[in-house]
Amino acid sequence: MDLDAYFSAHPDMADDASAAPPEGFRSGFVALVGRPNAGKSTLMNALVGQKVAITSSTPQTTRTNVQGVLTLPACQIVFVDTPGLHKPHDLLGEHLNAQATSALADVDVVAMLIDSTKPVGRGDEWVAAHVASSPAAKMLVLSKSDIATPAQTASQFEAARGLADWDAVVSLSAKTGYNAKAFLEEVTELLPVGPLWYPKDMISNVAERTMISEVIREKVLRSFRDEVPHSVGVLVDEMEEERGLLRIEASIYVERESQKAMLIGAKGASVKRLGQAARTDIEQMFKVRCYLGLKVKVKKHWRKDESSLQRFGYTE
Ligand SMILES: Nc1nc2c(ncn2[C@@H]2O[C@H](COP(=O)(O)OP(=O)(O)OP(=O)(O)O)[C@@H](O)[C@H]2O)c(=O)[nH]1
Ligand SMILES: [Mg+2]
């Protein structure tokens, strides 16, 4: 996404990272909420200009609240990407919903995303009820406009306009950047005058180790559409950098032997392929050469087990 136009509209942006923000500088926190797969993480990545959160076509890709920071000349926006709100089937699902709803209480703006191509339904009404009870300013975002017809967008707008008392409505595409600038302008309008919450060059609050395990999980989600995705967890066991080489040993946990076999593939071909894809991303993100060793392990019912959820970083 090209935000150059937005940057050049504010030529007073100080290059000096330590300079105080100008008079009238606005800042605050903006939660991105919605049903699974609505496009929340893709939008956050596009807006901050870097991959901060993993994305995939599998619902419930995001498992924890992830912050992405965009600092512009006139404002600093801290996006809080949240797990998709859904009907939970296990402890992990309950945790995902709790994460998402907890963000609603602590932000200045809540942007609720609705996929323009999927009819507004009970799931959206349920999300909107949570949004409506938040004290934050409220935005309705109709996402994926690039694949929606104008008629679809219009009927989505009709169906969603009454779901909450919206302060602003935007139809946009994270993929093409259509209306991204309009979205940022609306968000900025709704933010209070405030300080820089984070250094100007900070993009995310995600720790390196977490980012690496997330990238590996993304490659599993993208390689296996149905059987494996929901039951996969990833842990980085070891990580050290020596003479420009980042050596990582990580474990992929699944719940059944059959899933383990599928992940490994014939003669290890599947795990090798996804490992290569993860390594390429890691090398790009951290600008280092990387060695990535992957093991696949079975841990039965980890999604129902509080201590396992804790190990994977999904509970406090
Ligand atoms: N065509 C198109 N596809 C999009 C757009 N935004 C997201 N997608 C696709 O929609 C799917 C879901 O995107 P995510 O960003 O992972 O959705 P999410 O809302 O974060 O999903 P959860 O984390 O599971 O709640 C992915 O396949 C994206 O590539 C868009 O603007 N246009
Ligand atoms: Mg997501």
Image (tube, rainbow, N blue to C red):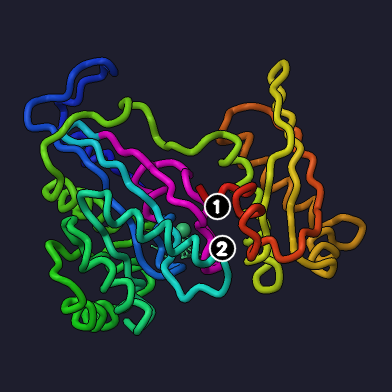
Rendered view: 294 above or below 25: below
Q: Residue at x 35, y 84 (%)?
A: 122
Which residue lies at the image location 26% right of the left edge and 15% below the top edge? 18
Q: Position of residue 276 (x, y in %)?
A: 73, 46
Residue 85 percent coordinates (x, y): 41, 68
Give me the residue at 65% from left, 70% from top.
225
Amino acid beneath label 1: Tyr
Judging depth in this view, the residue of 203 and 301 nearest the camera is: 301
Residue type, mark 2 in image: Leu
The answer to the question of whether label 2 and label 1 lie on touching residues, with beta carbons closer than 8 A, is yes
Along the line of sight, which residue is nearer the eye, 201 or 296? 296
Secondary structure under tag 2 reads helix
Residue at 29 percent of width and 57 percent of height? 104
Give the x, y percent position of residue 66: 43, 47
Q: Which residue is mark 2?
A: 92
- Residue 97: name its quadrant: bottom left
Q: Which mark is residue 306?
A: none
Q: CA distance from mark 2 to mark 1?
A: 8 Å
Left or right, residue 141 beside residue 100? left
Residue closer to the observer: 49 or 217: 217
Q: Position of residue 219 (x, y in %)?
A: 65, 54
Q: Is residue 50 magenta?
A: yes
Total numbered labels placed on residues in the image: 2
> Which residues make up the magenta segment?
43-71
Label 1 element class: loop
The residue where tag 1 is placed is 314
